[in-house]
Structures are given as structure tokens and as C-alpha cells.
Amino acid sequence: MKTVWIATGNPHKTEEFAAMLGDDVQVKTLKDLKEEPEITEDGTSFEENALIKARALHAIVHEPVMSDDSGLEVDALDKAPGIYSARFMGEDTDYTAKNNAILDAIKDKKGEERSARFVCAIAWIEEDGTEHVYRGTMEGYINDSIKGDHGFGYDPIFYYSPFGTTSADVDPEVKNSASHRHNALVQLEKDWSK
Ligand code: IMP
């Protein structure tokens, strides 16, 4: 059976990759290593950070590796928090505070000025070291208030027009079928199944 490593300890991300790879692939993660490597995500783009994580794991396991890096870009804030989405205002700050800070920072912006997107870069390194990177996005707007109880992170302030509401205000399956991660995974899947 083929093994693919996912450079994450996050079970939700692992599940999404495993579903795409199917039953005949054994999925392993950082949790399956004797010791988790210290990985410094010091890239300047989602793509670089995804590759940094994948390369660090590939150097240890020498088997196929996949990883992702994602975040929210708010155009009126020069694409912040961007690659710093998880670290914005501190890793331990709750998302109600982070979301309120973004709402406050762009409170004077109207309509198109509130454009934003979720971005996900996925890296895949084959066993022989061949590298691939894919980018998926979900284009939307910053809502004028926090809305919805589903999802995580910035979902309660992310208005997605096809939903007519925020990505926290729809069932998770609905959100996942349109998400930036899904859109990047679809591209990876095409190459993977070649
Ligand atoms: P990562 O785990 O390094 O990719 O960090 C992603 C961060 O971006 C998360 O901690 C969230 O703050 C944010 N983020 C990424 N994708 C989403 C999403 O689908 N909804 C809400 N927030 C997201």
C-alpha cells in the first residue's frame, strides 16, 4: 500500500487529504513521527510556507509528502492578515477579538472596498523530490458584523455571495465544497490521479 505523509498535526486537514487520496493510500502525519520536527514557517507567501513544511517532512521520511498553508487576505488592509492569519494579534487570541479588530479596521469601507479572499496553497513533493504547488481561493467580502456559528477562524466575518451569507452561517459541508482548500485539492487530485 502506498503511503502519503501530510505535514500537519491537524486532524481536520488530514481528513480532507485522506478523503481525496482514497482508501488504497495510507495517510501518515507529523503525529506518526517519533519526534515532531520544529518547522519555522518563514516564507513570504502561502506557497513558500507550504513548501517549507513539505520539504522538512520529506527530508525525514523520503516518501510522498503533502502540506498546505492558508489564510485570509483583506484587500483594504494590504492583504493582511495573509500568511500571518493564525498568528494575527497572537496565536492565543480568540477569533472574536481578531474578527472584531478586522471589522473595526475597515468600518469606513463600503461595497467592493470590502473585498477579501481565503487562500490555500497545497504543496506535493513526490518520493523522488519532484515538487508541485497549487493555489485555491474563495473570493468574498468582509461582512459588516460577525454572523454564524459554524466553521472556524475568520468564517464569521467572511461573506460569500453564492451563499448570501457568511461561510460560518452555512453547513460545514456546503462551505467545504466551495472552499479555497477544496479548490486547491481539486487541482492536486488531477495531477495525483494521472
Ligand atoms: P494554517 O493552519 O497555517 O494554514 O493557518 C490558517 C489560518 O488561516 C487559520 O488559523 C485561520 O485563522 C485562517 N483560515 C484558513 N482557512 C480558513 C477558513 O476556511 N475559514 C476561516 N479561517 C481560515
Image (spheres, rainbow, N blue to C red):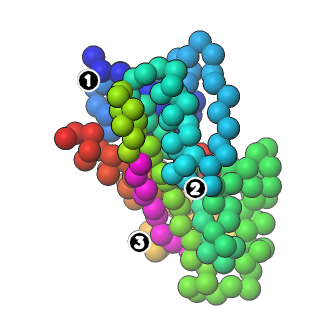
**Proximity of marks 2 and 1: CB atoms separated by less than 8 Å:** no
Residue interval drawn in magenta = 133-144
Tell me what residue is drawn at x 47 percent, y 31 percent. Answer: 6
> Which residue, given by chain and number where applicable, does mark 3 sit on?
162
Label 2 is placed on what type of residue? Ser
Q: Quadrant of the N terminus?
A: top left
59 in relation to 112, above or below = above
98 in relation to 20, above or below = below
> Which residue, given by chain and number where applicable, does mark 2 sit on?
45
| Element type at mark 3 | helix
| Element type at mark 1 | loop
Work out how far the residue at label 2 is from the one at label 1, CA to CA, in angstroms: 33 Å
Q: Position of residue 98 (x, y in %)?
A: 75, 59
| Element type at mark 2 | loop
Which of the two marks, 3 or 2, is nearer to us in this view? Answer: 2
| Numbered marks: total | 3
> Which residue, given by chain and number where applicable, does mark 1 sit on?
24
Tell me what residue is drawn at x 62 percent, y 55 percent. Answer: 44
Q: Earlier in the sequence, mark 2 or mark 1?
A: 1
Q: Quadrant of the C terminus?
A: top left
Do we see residue 15 in this rendering?
A: no
The crowding category of the residue bearing disc 1, from other C-alpha atoms within 10 Å (few below 14, some 14 to 19, many at least 20), is few
- Residue 44 lies left or right of residue 20; in this view the side is right
Identify the image quadrant of residue 145: bottom right
Tell me what residue is drawn at x 35 percent, y 21 percent. Answer: 3
Work out how far the residue at label 3 is from the one at label 1, CA to CA, in angstroms: 35 Å
Judge by depth and name the residue closer to the eye, 162 or 59. Answer: 59
Mark 1 vs ligand 1: CB below 8 Å: no
Q: Earlier in the sequence, mark 3 or mark 2?
A: 2
The crowding category of the residue bearing disc 2, from other C-alpha atoms within 10 Å (few below 14, some 14 to 19, many at least 20), is some
The crowding category of the residue bearing disc 3, from other C-alpha atoms within 10 Å (few below 14, some 14 to 19, many at least 20), is few
Whether the magenta-drawn stretch holds residue 139 is answered as yes
